[in-house]
Amino acid sequence: MNTVPGSPKRGYRTIRLPLVKDAYERFLSDNAYCRMQLDELYRQHPELFPAGWEEGYLLCGKTPSSSKQGIRCQRVRLVAGAVVYTVAPTCVTPYMTWRTEEVEKALFLRRFHVPCWALAHVFGRDAM
C-alpha cells in the first residue's frame, strides 16, 4: 500500500547530509571546504547521494535564507542530467520550519500515534 498521496513531478531534490552545525557557516562560505566535505561524505555514505553524483557536480550558489530559521543551503548541479539539488543539514526539519532538537520529543511520541492535538496541548504549540 502506498501511503504517499502522489510522487512529485520533479522528484525530491534535497540532499540531507550530517553536516556539523558549528562548521556549517564555513561550508557555505568556503567553496574548497564545501567540495572537500561533499567528497568525503560521498566516500563514507554514497547512499545519501543521488544517482549520477559520481560523474561530477558543480556548486551553483546558495538558497535565500529560510523565513523561519534563517538558514541558507548550498545548491549543487549534477553534470549528468543537469539536475540541481539543494544540500541541507540534518539539524533542521524539512521546509526549515524547526531545528530537530526542538521537536525531537514530539516526533518520538508521534511514533506511538499520539494525536497532534495532544502534542500541541502538552508542548504548547499549534497542532499544525
Image (tube, rainbow, N blue to C red):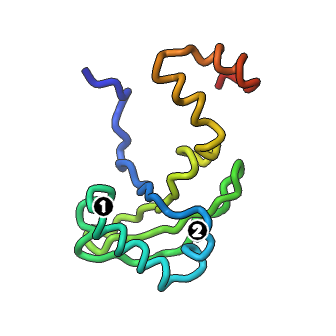
Residue 9, percent from left and from top: 35, 44
> What is the number of the mark on residue 33?
none
SS category of the residue bearing label 2: helix
Which residue is the site of mark 1? 45
Task: Indicate left or right for 118 with 94 as reference.
Answer: right
Residue found 37% across the figure and 41% down from its top? 8
Q: Residues under labels 1 and 2: Cα distance? A: 18 Å
Task: Indicate left or right for 38 with 23 as reference.
Answer: left
Q: Earlier in the sequence, mark 1 or mark 2?
A: 2
- The quadrant of the rendering that contains the N terminus is top left
Residue found 38% across the figure and 27% down from its top? 5
Q: Nearer the viewer, residue 73 or 45?
A: 45
Mark 1 is on which residue type? His
Mark 2 is on which residue type? Tyr
Residue found 27% across the figure and 56% down from its top? 47
Mark 2 packing: few (<14 Cα in 10 Å), some, or many (20+)? some
Mark 1 packing: few (<14 Cα in 10 Å), some, or many (20+)? few
Location of residue 84 by image quarter: bottom left
Task: Indicate left or right for 36 with 52 as reference.
Answer: right
SS category of the residue bearing label 1: loop
Tags 1 and 2 touching, CB below 8 Å: no
Which residue is the site of mark 2? 24
Residue 38, percent from left and from top: 40, 72
Residue 23, percent from left and from top: 58, 71
Query: Is 3 drawn above or below residue 84 in the view shown?
Result: above
Q: Nearer the viewer, residue 35 or 72?
A: 35
Residue found 56% across the figure and 52% down from its top? 91
- The quadrant of the rendering that contains the C terminus is top right
Query: Is 113 drawn above or below residue 107 in the view shown?
Result: above
